Image (cartoon, grey):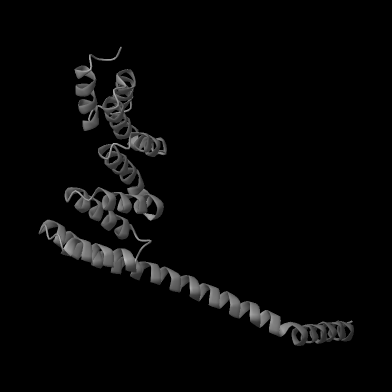
Amino acid sequence: MSGSYDFEEQERIAELKAWWEDNRWYVLGAVVAAAVAFSGYRGWIYWKASTAEDAAAMYQPVEEALKANDAKKVPETAQALIAKHPGSFFASEAALVLAKSAFDAGKLDEARKQLEWVMANGAEEHRGIARVRLAAILMEQKKFDEALKTLDGNKDEAFVPLASDLRGDIMLAQGRLDEARAAYKLAIDKSSPRNPVRNIAETKLNALGGAQ
């Protein structure tokens, strides 16, 4: 019985060796591929972290130029950051800074360009505010229909009060008083009691004679 068992065992070992000879390169290849994939994943995590660090470091001069009100340095530092790390949180933050700087200088088309870039490429956290600011610029340019269409694209509940208040301003500028009242009313209804938009919208609504 023992001899029979040993013979069977030897047969299985021989089969295993034969299988290994036939398949070892596939097995080794799979192991190497898994190792490379893991290494690549770790490398990607490291790259992402180091990229974020570099983007954060590059944003520091943007902040400093902004505080110093340096009209030349703000665009220089912000554009350098956007060019190097276009997909980063700090790049869209820098683009918002560029937009404000351009708006303050009366360069509305440049401000619009930066805000459109944020809406298309920026961090999710920045897209809502970029949309509202863009609509405000379009209103300033008297492109009322375009401004309203921009606000229609808002899907973020957090920006509904602000977007509705601005919609009311656009309607008011067009002489559409009933629609302006409805927009201000919506801004009030969607605002929390501590939201400053609520008081602003209430003031405007009261100036129009209240909701009718």
Q: Residue at x 39, y 55 (%)?
A: 121
- State the image coordinates of residue 25 (x, y, percent, origin top left): 69, 84
Residue 192 image point, x, y percent: 28, 29
Q: Is residue 83 left or right of residue 1?
A: left
In this view of the protein, can residue 195 be seen by the observer? no
The residue depicted at 40 percent of the width and 52 percent of the height is 120
Q: Name which residue lies at 26% across and 58% down.
A: 94
Residue reaching furthest top?
212
Up-down relation of residue 210 to residue 73 (above or below): above
Whether 135 is drawn above or below 80: the answer is above
- Residue at 20% over, 26% down: 199
Quadrant of the rendered image containing residue 143: top left
Label tally: 0
Residue lying farthest left? Answer: 68
Q: Is residue 49 visible?
A: yes
- Depth check, front residue: 150 or 164: 150
Spot occupied by residue 59 in the image (x, y as percentages of width and height): 24, 63
- In the image, is 121 to the left or to the right of 7? left
The picture quadrant where one finds residue 72 is bottom left
Quadrant in the rendering for residue 31: bottom right
Q: Is residue 11 left or right of residue 165?
A: right
Which image quarter holds the N terminus?
Answer: bottom right
Q: Quadrant of the C terminus?
A: top left
